[in-house]
Image (cartoon, rainbow, N blue to C red):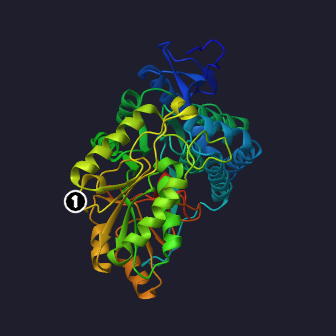
Amino acid sequence: MATSNVVVYQNYIAGAWRDGRGGATFTSANPAHDQELLGIFQRSTVEDLDEAIGAAQAAFPAWRATPAPERGEIILRAALILEQRREEYSKLLTREMGKVLKEARGDLQTAIDFGKFVAAAGRRAEGETVPSALRDKICLTLREPLGVVGIITPWNFPLAIPAWKIFPALVAGNTVVFKPASDTPLLATKLVEALVDAGLPPGVLNLVTGPGGTLGDALASDPRVAMISLTGSTEVGRRVAEVCGRDLRRVALELGGKNAIIVMDDGNLDEAAAAAAWAGFGTTGQRCTATSRIIVHRNVLDAFNDRLVALAEKQRLGDGLDPTVDMGPLVNRGRVGAVDSYIDIGKAEGARLLTGGRPARGGDLDEGAFFMPTVFSEVGAEMRIAREEIFGPVISVIPVTDYDQAIAVANGTEYGLSCAIFTEDMRKVFRAMRDIQAGLVYVNAGTTGAEPQLPFGGLKASGNGHRELGQRPLDEWSEVKSIFVSYPG
């Protein structure tokens, strides 16, 4: 694999692009054509991370003193720069992560929209003024930044998720050390470039690329870091929470999911199957909100299965830059093996494989990490394929006999991120809104699709209760200080 003409990218620390201290590097490749290298990146060491944290710490007093409206204006400029570069970055995103170009544009648009949305928070970082129980006294609250925050992001939304963490953290007055996923360091670098071009002062944002095991642990355990915000697996989230909990530092976790669509016997089957195919096979099933379970009333099981299988078998696989392609590759060949192992598990547990269930081969597909859209039916709620996060294009159809059983199955995993129900019965709709144990609930729609103005996050093992996005985007990134002012005569 030739690297002589491949661009070498650097860390960004204290306002300068610089090589890692250890001199080691790693590459980022196109998962649709994994001989195509997109860049060479720094395999950073703990020494690099130490410098980044020190730079963020040194920059904090001046950034905190910068008026919040001015901080917001920098974020707005960054959003407008992303908008100008949307098509360029969208194509890079497809090449680096694999999702089809339409979805890559959506990833960029989410970052742009939230940047515009959160920029205005610099002029409305709200506090409260409340009555006092005593005479000649006033009570109010102020919001203050936390200090240095560490941000660790995944590869499946390599621009949207970093943006919806970094933008509000900066508007709130924090300084940031950013450790992106090693599968998508190029898009992380492009996001930092946009913020630098928007006028962000040196040291306020620092980028360090490299192995998550080494750098993530070091970032989470450093007492100079006031907060860690992580989107990743539940296993990693537990580890980070344990490390931060030792000295009571704040941690915000967005973790795994085993999301379900409930299809009642009065639901629109065509709409439900289309939503399931989009939410289950979009981004090749590599979303934390992807639909991996369909809980279907036994009365309509066969009719629903026929529709879903037909849609699965119509999916065209290939390079996401091809406008005729419906589903791109998994993020790397290692993920192909991981997903494939669950096919054997499902068969051994007695589930019925309806379609797919194997890596995709032939022609250009041999060059990348492709897997066939897969549907199992007659899945039991206790089976591993119905309980464990597969993170690939694998859907398990679980038959039930009534609403109560459907809710019990939907709530019967450790996760609680996203859930949907298809029904025309408004009584069931309102009961489901109450009964479903998930942070995101969809009615007559799939389990995916965040909007910047609504909080995003999960329950149970899908997170620790913090919410990103939404109408109060600075809450997670600041502390509340209560002020008592007495003015006796």
Q: Using the image, determine if residue 25 lies above or below residue 285.
A: above
Q: Using the image, determine if residue 159 lies above or below residue 351.
A: above
In this view, the residue in front, 61 or 255, is 255
Q: Using the image, determine if residue 440 lies above or below residue 134.
A: above
Report x, y in % for residue 315.
55, 52
User: Which quadrant holds residue 184?
Assistant: top right
- The reply, left or right, for residue 320 in relation to residue 83 is left
Question: Is label 1 in a helix, a strand or a loop?
Answer: loop
Report x, y in % for residue 403.
32, 79
- The reply, left or right, for residue 44 in relation to residue 126 is left
Report x, y in % for residue 387.
28, 55
Q: Using the image, determine if residue 161 lies above or below residue 266.
A: above
Q: Amino acid at mark 1?
A: Glu
Q: Is residue 200 visible?
A: no
Q: Is residue 107 visible?
A: yes
In this view, the residue in front, 204 or 411, is 411
Residue at x-position 45% and y-position 56%: 289
In this view, the residue in front, 319 or 69, is 319
Report x, y in % for residue 126.
57, 64
- Which residue lies under the disc numbered 1? 382
Q: How many marks?
A: 1
In this view, the residue in front, 383 or 199, is 383
Residue at x-position 28% and y-position 43%: 242
